[in-house]
Each structure stands twice: as structure tokens, then as C-alpha cells.
């Protein structure tokens, strides 16, 4: 079997490894227009901070592709997929295939702000070249405006602060930081921490124009102007579907490549994974774009398994999990925010609790937890957790409960472990308080 994988991001890498694991004889060709393949491109902001994480740390360890006899074509763009001939054109050459996996990723979304001209304007993506370009310019300047208060915008702000910047603005058209993951009543805890570090938050921000001026950038707001050295655009990303559209594959309503539960596109010999595929949530089954490296790796494995063994594994969708560290605070979420749940027409009830996983004398930090439930089904549809301590276990527990629709009464009765030195499950008590609200 000859398999062509277009894209060497997390989805393409996991797919190639899984195919080789299942089929020792398959010919696997991976094509990428990038010059370098990063093992962990989500670590780019950490490299930009300087210090512990270096460029060498984000490349694939050892000889992953060579040891698995996977052919990798760098600087080689796939320009056409000739489906009826079962061949693709890459770098001007023709390659035949039996199956194809599209791992095309996403491209930065640039808002239509008047005056953007490409000068002193930067973005960040999984392309390591973008990171290297930023690394080269950061030492030259001292101030920046970060447009977009999502995860990439926050992580870029952390990087700039670590590199000595003392004049940083974060602007977003929405009301709070991390708007895809936090409601305002939870985000204010993190916003306070960010402001304490000297970062000015302008939320919401109505940017009328951005101009280049005196080697820097001038940001025009209704009541003031901001003068900075450069602008970092963290305004989201959109699925990269140009190749798929050109090949005549179906594009879903979200703008991503439509797939079935086996991750096949409208052509059964072509699968799509990661950021370029149209995903769906496990709560309402509504279609969505979900651009996360963990989802890309998982869907790559699912598609590879189905490609080799026949369609035997159903992709369940995403629980929309998220986690980030901001100035010593871990922030995590699952499912919908309360705002998003209401926009989907759900009748939701929420509760915020502050709990201690153990008695204060053991030195553990409080946990701030918001749970959101559907009043009708009495199932969780979202959760948000913030603490200086580790929240990974809580997020994992809440992800399973949300994804597999564990009823609140059952979740409140699950026997979880406790030790004075380790702590216990603070989620269970928050669930009980939420149930009391539902019951009136």
C-alpha cells in the first residue's frame, strides 16, 4: 500500500507512525512545504521566552522518520490531487497513491483592520519559520501590542515580558481574556494577575485603524492612540482547505473539510485530520473548528488505523479541553463556556466555588471552579478551573464526565481518593452545590 500524507504537523506525524506500526510494508511519503519539522510547535512561545527551552528541544527526537522508513519531503508543496488518477503533484513531481491523509493545518486569520501593511506585524503558527522570525526581531524592540487575548496572545505576552518588555498592551474585541475558555466571572481572576505584571488590558477594544509611523505602529482607538514598536496578531486561525477545495472535496459549513466518523472526506480514499477537518463537539454533536495539537494527534491515529485496518474506529468528537499556565496559575476548561452554551440555546445553570483540596496547614492552594450544567438533562456541559496548584487531574475528570454525559447525581457519588498530604476531590462538592441550585 502506498500512502501519501500531506502535512507534517501533529496529525501527519502521528498518522505516519501509526501506519508503520500497523503495516510494516507500506510505502509512506510525507510532504511538507516547510523547511523544518517541529515535534512540539506549541512550545514556540516557550522558546521565545528564552532560557530553558531552546530551538533544539522542539524538533523530533532521534531519527523518528528514518527509523520507521518514512520518506519525508521538505520544502515540497503539494499543489494538486488528481483523484481520478490517484496521484498527486508535489514540487512539480508526480506521486501515485492508494490512500491519502490530509493534515493541512490552519493559517493565521488576519482581521480587516484598516492600515495593516505587513510592516512590523507578526503572527505565530506551527511553522517554525514564523517563530524564528519573531526571535530575530524581539531583541530589537521594547514595546508591543498583542491583538487577541486568546491562548497564543497570552503566551506571546509572557514571552515578551520574559525578554524584558515593559510596555505591552493586550487588545481584544471581546470582554475578557481567554474568551473561548473562560467566562467573565472566572477570567477576572487571571486578568488581575496579568495587570499586576504591568500589562495593560484593553477589553473590549474597538480598533479603527493601525498605521505605520516612525518605524513603529500607531493603533487608533476611539479615545486614545497607542504607539508601539510592533504588533503581534493573535486573532485566531482558519482551516487550510485550499488544496482540498481545488481537489473537489466537500467543505463543511464551518469552512473546514467535511469528514465522517471514520475521518474520511467525500472521497473514501482520502482522510483529513487535525485543524483542517471539520470537527464536532461531544455535547451537542454540533459541527465546529477545533484547532488543538492534541486533537490533531488523536485524529491522525484514528485516520491511520481506519486506513490500514478498514473503518473500524469511530472518532467520537471533541470535549473541547484546554489548559494553560499564566504567571504561576493553571487555567483549564472543558466544554462550553456559559456564554457559548446559552448561545446554543441550552438552558444552563452554573455555580462557582472556591475550595481547598486539603486543609490549609498542608500548604496547598485554593481551587476556583465553575461548573455549568444543562437544567433539562442534568449533565455537565462546561467547566472552568483556576489554581496555583495542579489542575490536570480535575480537568481530566471533568472531561470524561462531560464527554460521556455522566449525570450529576452519579458524579457526586463517585468514590475518589483522599490523603492529607495529597488532597482529595474538590469537584464532587462543587457538583453537589450545583445540584442544589438545579433543584431549587
Image (cartoon, rainbow, N blue to C red):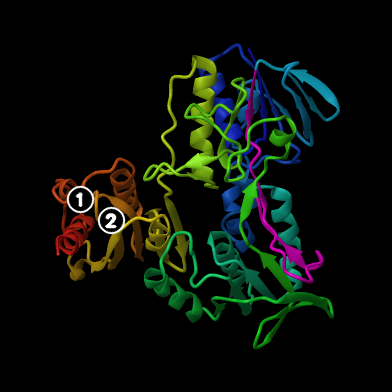
Residue 50 image position (x, y, % from top left) = 62, 62
In which quadrant will I find the N terminus?
A: top right
Looking at the image, residue 154 sits to the left or right of residue 115; the answer is left
Kindly state the secondary structure of the residue where label 2 is placed: strand
The magenta stretch spans which residues? Answer: 99-125
Residue at 41% across, 34% down: 316
* Residue drawn at the location 74% of the way across and 41% of the way down: 34
Which corner quadrant of the image does residue 211 belong to?
bottom right
Numbered badge on residue 373:
2
Q: Is residue 158 above or below residue 375?
A: below
Task: Please tell me which residue lies in front, 174 or 266.
Answer: 266
- From the top left corner, tell me how far across and down residue 273 is, in percent: 57, 34
Give the class, few, some or many, for how many residues have Cα within 10 Å of label 1's Cα (few <14, many ≥20).
Answer: many
Report how many numbered discs are placed on residues in the image.
2
**Is residue 209 among what the camera can see?**
yes
Q: Are marks 2 and 1 in contact (CB under 8 Å)?
A: yes
Residue identifier under label 1:
408
Is residue 114 found inside the magenta-colored segment of the image? yes
The reply to whether residue 363 is in sight is no
Name which residue lies at 58% across and 71% down: 173
Question: What secondary structure is the stretch in magenta mostly built from?
Answer: loop
Instruction: Please report whichever mark, 2 or 1, sits nearer to the chain's N-terminal start.
Output: 2
Per the model, the C-alpha gap separating discs 2 and 1 is 8 Å
Measuring 54% from the left and 76% from the top, which residue is drawn there? 203
Is residue 247 shown in magenta? no
Label 1, secondary structure: give it.
Answer: helix
Report the side of 157 relative to 6 (left or right). left
Residue 12: x and y in percent read 61, 33
Position above or below: 81 against 276: above
Amino acid at each position: 500500500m502506498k500512502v501519501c500524507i500531506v502535512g507534517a504537523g501533529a496529525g501527519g506525524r502521528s498518522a505516519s507512525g501509526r501506519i508503520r506500526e500497523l503495516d510494516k510494508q507500506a510505502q509512506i511519503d510525507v510532504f511538507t512545504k516547510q523547511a523544518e519539522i517541529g515535534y512540539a510547535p506549541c512550545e514556540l512561545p516557550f522558546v521565545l521566552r528564552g532560557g530553558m527551552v531552546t530551538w533544539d528541544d522542539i524538533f523530533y527526537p532521534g531519527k523518528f522518520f528514518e527509523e520507521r522508513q518514512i520518506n519525508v519531503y521538505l520544502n515540497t508543496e503539494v499543489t494538486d490531487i488528481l483523484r481520478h488518477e490517484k496521484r498527486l503533484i508535489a514540487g512539480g513531481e508526480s506521486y501515485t497513491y492508494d490512500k491519502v491523509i490530509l493534515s493541512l493545518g490552519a493559517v493565521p486569520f488576519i482581521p480587516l483592520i484598516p492600515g495593516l501593511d505587513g510592516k512590523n506585524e507578526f503572527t505565530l503558527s506551527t511553522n517554525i519559520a514564523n517563530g524564528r522570525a519573531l526571535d530575530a526581531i524581539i531583541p530589537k524592540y521594547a514595546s508591543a501590542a498583542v491583538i487577541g487575548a486568546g491562548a497564543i496572545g497570552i503566551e506571546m505576552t509572557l514571552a515578551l515580558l520574559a525578554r524584558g518588555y515593559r510596555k505591552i498592551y493586550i487588545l481584544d474585541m471581546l470582554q475578557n481574556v481567554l474568551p473561548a475558555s473562560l467566562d467573565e466571572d472566572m477570567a477576572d481572576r487571571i486578568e488581575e494577575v496579568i495587570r499586576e505584571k504591568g500589562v495593560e488590558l484593553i477589553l473590549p477594544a474597538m480598533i479603527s485603524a493601525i498605521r505605520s509611523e516612525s518605524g513603529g505602529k500607531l493603533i487608533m482607538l476611539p479615545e486614545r492612540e497607542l504607539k508601539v514598536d510592533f504588533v503581534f496578531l493573535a486573532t485566531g486561525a482558519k482551516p487550510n482547505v485550499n488544496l482540498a477545495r481545488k481537489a473537489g472535496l466537500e467543505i463543511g459549513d464551518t469552512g473546514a473539510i467535511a469528514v465522517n466518523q471514520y475521518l474520511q472526506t467525500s472521497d473514501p480514499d482520502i482522510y483529513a485530520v487535525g485543524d483542517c477537518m471539520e470537527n464536532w463537539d461531544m455535547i451537542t454533536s454540533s459541527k465546529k473548528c477545533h484547532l488543538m495539537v492534541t486533537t490533531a494527534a488523536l485524529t491522525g491515529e484514528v485516520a491511520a488505523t481506519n486506513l490500514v485496518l478498514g473503518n473500524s474506529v469511530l472518532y467520537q468528537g471533541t470535549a473541547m479541553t484546554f489548559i494553560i499556565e499564566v504567571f504561576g496559575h493553571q487555567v483549564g476548561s472543558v466544554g462550553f463556556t456559559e456564554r457559548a452554551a446559552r448561545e446554543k440555546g441550552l438552558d444552563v445553570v452554573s455555580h462557582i466555588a472556591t475550595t481547598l483540596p486539603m486543609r490549609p496547614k498542608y500548604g496547598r492552594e485554593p481551587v476556583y471552579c465553575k461548573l455549568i450544567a444543562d437544567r433539562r438533562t442534568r449533565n455537565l456541559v462546561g467547566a472552568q478551573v483556576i489554581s496555583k496548584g495542579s489542575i490536570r487531574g480535575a480537568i481530566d475528570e471533568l472531561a470524561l464526565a462531560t464527554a460521556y454525559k455522566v449525570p450529576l447525581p452519579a458524579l457526586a457519588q463517585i468514590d475518589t481518593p483522599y490523603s492529607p498530604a495529597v488532597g482529595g476531590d474538590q469537584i464532587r462538592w462543587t457538583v453537589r452545590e450545583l445540584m442544589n441550585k438545579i433543584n431549587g
